[in-house]
Image (cartoon, helix red, strand yellow):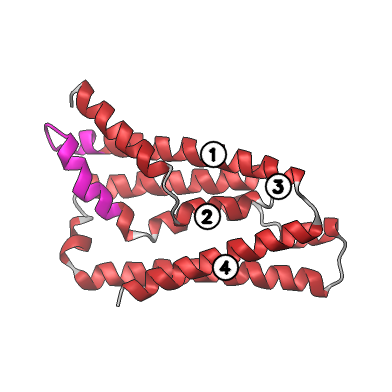
């Protein structure tokens, strides 16, 4: 790999990282619960990207490109998972309100744990076949020699760039939410994030058809 190719690939990763996607909205959703939760979701997504890069580097992701059935199956599973996250957010919010909890108690009810936030980010990325296909389609264009090590190195760069962007997003979002933690504002943010996740999940699953 040459320096110019590395710079070109890094620039592409930066452009892609600032483009909103399912992982972005997932990080924002968990940032509502707190900075640590948003950062955990961001890191989980980054680890998922490393896993995809390893799979592609080993040549296994070629199966998804060649098999329409495998691609649709993974896509549907990913869509269903996003729908699950969205519906669960709405149910938790309604349960908190039905219980007549004070804002602080409602926050404890609707706040996920840091490990669950990490797991959500991880599985959201792992169940998105477009991540694997991106690596499969883009990495060879920036490699002078297609080897496992070179492909994995580019995958690590992409995951690192994405992690930095999403961690910064989580920290900024959590700070903004701390400033706007009125019950009505919090409820609206919960509903919007749940709706976006559900819509993304429905769109992902529907596009598989």
Image spot of residue 139 (x, y percent): 21, 41
Q: Secondary structure at mark 3?
A: helix
Residue 7 lies left or right of residue 30; in this view the side is left
Which image quadrant: the N terminus?
top left
Mark closest to the chain's N terminus, 3 or 4? 3
The tag earlier along the polypeptide, 4 or 2, is: 2
The dot on residue 195 is 4
Q: Magenta stretch?
A: 132-151
Identify whether 175 is placed above or below 122.
Answer: above
Residue that numbered label 3 is attached to: 177
Asked whether residue 150 is drawn in magenta, I would say yes
Disc nearer the start of the sequence (3/1): 1
Where residue 134 appears, x then y in whole percent? 27, 50
| Residue to which mark 2 is pinned | 25
Q: Residue drawn at (12%, 31%), measured in percent from left and top?
A: 144
- Residue at horizontal 39 percent and vertical 56 percent from the top: 126
Q: Secondary structure at mark 1?
A: helix
- Closer to viewer: mark 3 or mark 1: 3
Disc 4 to disc 2, how far (Cα)? 10 Å
Q: Image quadrant for the C terminus?
A: bottom left
- What is the secondary structure assignment of the residue under circle 4? helix
Q: Are marks 1 and 2 in contact (CB under 8 Å)?
A: no
């Amino acid at each position: 790999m040459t320096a110019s190719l590395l710079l070109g690939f890094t620039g592409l990763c930066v452009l892609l990282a600032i483009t909103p996607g399912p992982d972005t909205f997932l990080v924002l959703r968990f940032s509502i619960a707190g900075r640590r939760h948003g950062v955990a979701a961001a890191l989980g997504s980054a680890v998922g990207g490393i896993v995809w890069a390893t799979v592609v580097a080993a040549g296994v992701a070629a199966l998804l490109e060649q098999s329409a059935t495998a691609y649709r199956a993974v896509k549907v599973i990913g869509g269903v998972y996003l729908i699950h996250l969205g519906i669960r957010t709405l149910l938790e919010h309604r349960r908190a309100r039905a219980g007549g909890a004070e804002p602080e108690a409602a926050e404890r009810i609707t706040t996920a744990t840091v490990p669950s936030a990490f797991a959500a980010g991880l599985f959201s990325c792992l169940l998105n076949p477009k991540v694997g296909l991106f690596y499969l389609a883009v990495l060879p264009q920036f490699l002078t020699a297609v080897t496992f090590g070179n492909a994995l190195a580019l995958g690590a760069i992409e995951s690192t760039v994405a992690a930095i962007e999403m961690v910064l997003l989580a920290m900024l979002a959590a700070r903004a939410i701390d400033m706007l933690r009125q019950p009505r504002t919090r409820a609206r943010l919960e509903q919007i994030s749940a709706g976006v996740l559900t819509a993304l999940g429905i769109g992902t699953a529907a596009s598989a058809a």
